[in-house]
Image (cartoon, helix red, strand yellow):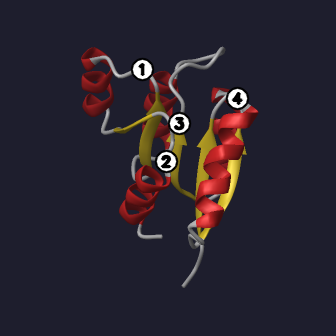
Amino acid sequence: MEKKNLLIVDDSRVARMVVRSIIENLKANVVILEAANGQEALQAIRDNQVHAVLLDHGMPDKSGLEVAVEIRAEKPDILIYMLTANVQESMKSRAQTVGVGFIEKPATEEKIRDFLERTGS
């Protein structure tokens, strides 16, 4: 089976490392790409065939939601999930409006496994 490209977007290198470690431990059939901000995320989806994105909400240049809207405009079929500690109903509602799923931080093996199952990995 062909590996799918999964993009992890978080301004925290440690947070990206934690998610990467969980995915690697689950032995998922994915190639992990990383971006530290919205601009890098958009460049990554332009340069690669990205199948799914795990996106932090609170980033310095653009919010994860703003990045999700831009990704949707360019690549509407990419599966996007916010991985964030911001659990306010208003944020969840806005995310759902753009077709973005929601995973509450902290990232756990169970939460990441569920996400990977949605990607077909």
For label 3, the SS is strand
- Residue kind at label 1, given as amino acid type: Asn
Look at the picture and state if 70 lies above or below 119.
above
Relative vertical location of residue 55 with respect to residue 47 in this rendering, above or below: above
Q: Are marks 2 and 4 in contact (CB under 8 Å)?
A: no
Q: Which residue is mark 1?
A: 86
Q: Residue at x 65, y 15 (%)?
A: 61
Image spot of residue 114 (x, y percent) = 38, 58
Q: Identity of the amino acid at label 3?
A: Leu
Q: Residue at x 67, y 57 (%)?
A: 32
* Residue matched to label 4: 12
Q: Residue furthest right?
A: 13
Q: Are marks 2 and 1 in contact (CB under 8 Å)?
A: no
- Return the residue at label 3: 55
Horizontal and vertical percent for residue 64?
51, 26
**Local SS, label 1:** loop
- Counting residues from the start of the chain, the first of labels 1 and 4 encountered is 4
Quadrant of the rendered image containing residue 4:
bottom right
Give yes or no for contact between labels 3 and 1 (Cβ–Cβ under 8 Å).
no
Q: CA distance from mark 3 to mark 2?
A: 15 Å
Residue 108's disc number: 2
Residue at disc 2, secondary structure:
loop
Q: Nearer the viewer, mark 3 or mark 1?
A: 1
